[in-house]
Amino acid sequence: LTEKLQNVFKNLRSKGRLTEADVQEALKEIKRALLAADVNFKVVKDFIKTVQERAVGQDVMNGLNPGQMVIKIVNEELCNLMGSETTEIKLQPGSAITVIMMAGLQGAGKTTTTAKLAGKFKLKGKKPLLVACDVYRPAAIKQLQINGEKQGVEVFTMGDNHKPANIAKAAIEHAQKNGNNLVILDTAGRLHIDEDMMAELEEIKNTVTVHQTILVIDAMTGQDAVNVAKEFDEKIGVDGVIVTKLDGDTRGGAALSVKAVTGKPILYVGMGEKLSDLEQFYPDRMANRILGMGDVLSLIEKAEAELDIDEDKAKEMSKKMKKAQFDFDDYLESIKQMKKLGGLGNIMNMLPGLGGMGMGKMKGLGDEQMDEAEKGMARMEAMIHSMTPAERRDPDLLNPSRKHRIAKGAGVDISEVNRMIKQFNEAKKMMKTFAKPGKKGKFKLPF
Ligand code: GDP
Ligand code: MG
């Protein structure tokens, strides 16, 4: 999350509702973040429009602040754009041979990905045959052979003086005799979109039955990824996309653009040069990565889940608060709630500059102070645990000798017991003031 972006959300924090101006201001930064992530500018434009239409006037969900609400909508729309779930490569049924053709620009990662895929399918019980259809560079054939050997799968080559379409045909015949049920054609790329390259791929498709054409795109292609994907799809037809080199520091905007423009699913992502570095594509993870705000989102999800589950408890507690019947058991409960959200430090870490969940005042605490606050909370828990049930319900019972016993039980100084009781009484007083009748109760932590 860029600092700029954080600031926008910080500014949105204290407001009760999303106004058009708020949303516009936030989206200006989202737009910048998307462009910086190399998402195609036309895709960005459409995206911003969609989010704007959805966000303005929308009620802010319980448990979220307005800034988080905008992020939530942005994230949902990003996931929508990239497809709602993972997509598998479609194989022919039964023991029929599936022919996959790899396509893409030179250096995109076709040969590497061919071997990676072979490994994946071998694990699933397939018997792959890799086919060297890149006849322009002797090194390319060798590269496929080496990678195939590493994966323990067979590689079919006819050297470099045959047409790729004919090699493919011979390879499939070989597969039929040899019992291979998955044929992956590793083809040649060019540095740029090129008529000869397309013609060659077309010829392969006209000569043999290709069941799946997979476009390999380098994540670092940036803005141009959209044009590359469109061209390949229009000329030869693409069934799915694999985005490579996402282990680098690119944010992966190419993936978003390609999916948005071609509508073709992203099947896998390449996460390194090793042959095991091929991962399933998760739209939500990619959305997080593109915006660079993964942790914030996971907190929002957690907050949603917890608020959902504990709605009854929250209602009950709010009733108690209204009557100022809040006791130490409730205090303990709210500490538990907070822990469910990963503890104080975690909450603060996940909210860079957001300070949501009614914790805005704690923003600006340093690491040390945060540590201190966490420890304080743990000691508070220990003290409450050292109370008898009667004492928890009725703090007025806490005379000096009881306080001594509690301090000893919790391993803290008596002054700390006194401080907690004082804080507790203050919190209770505060609740009396804030809990106005008629207002819909909302679970708040008494810290
Ligand atoms: P091709 O020309 O399309 O066949 O591309 P190659 O498979 O030869 O890959 C080109 C270069 O990119 C090689 O050095 C690969 O090791 C590297 N490469 C491929 N996929 C990835 C990936 O996911 N991550 C990284 N870091 N490098 C990759
Ligand atoms: Mg290659």
Image: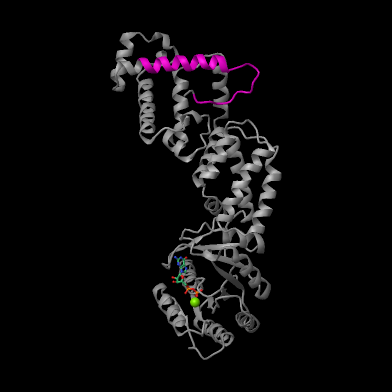
Furthest-bottom residue in this view: 161
Which image quadrant for residue 93?
A: bottom right
Instruction: Decide which of 436, 249 is in the foreground and name it.
Output: 249
Instruction: Decide which of 228, 302 is in the foreground and name it.
Output: 228
Q: Residue 231 at what x, y percent from top left?
A: 65, 72
Q: Residue 95 at what x, y percent from top left?
A: 56, 74
From this view, report whether residue 416 is shown above or below residue 29.
above
Figure disc tally: 0
Colour mapping used in the image? one colour
Regarding residue 359, the answer to whether it shows in the image is: no
Residue visible at 63% across and 70% down in the picture: 238
Q: Is residue 343 left or right of residue 321?
A: left
Instruction: Decide which of 431, 395 is in the foreground and name it.
Output: 431
Q: Is residue 80 left or right of residue 348?
A: right
Instruction: Decide which of 169, 407 is in the foreground and name it.
Output: 407
Residue visible at 61% across and 41% down in the picture: 70
**Residue range corresponding to the magenta coloring:** 418-445
Please say whether residue 116 is one of the residues in the magenta stretch.
Answer: no
Q: Residue 85 at what x, y percent from top left?
A: 59, 55
Regarding residue 21, the answer to whether it shows in the image is: yes
From this view, report whether residue 6 is shown above or below residue 217.
above
Residue visible at 46% across and 30% down in the picture: 362
- Mostly what secondary structure, the magenta segment? helix
Residue visible at 61% across and 70% down in the picture: 228
Q: Residue 31 at what x, y percent from top left?
A: 61, 50
Please say whether residue 439 is one of the residues in the magenta stretch.
Answer: yes
From this view, report whether residue 102 is shown above or below residue 400.
below
Q: Is residue 50 left or right of residue 111?
A: right
Q: Is residue 199 left or right of residue 375?
A: right
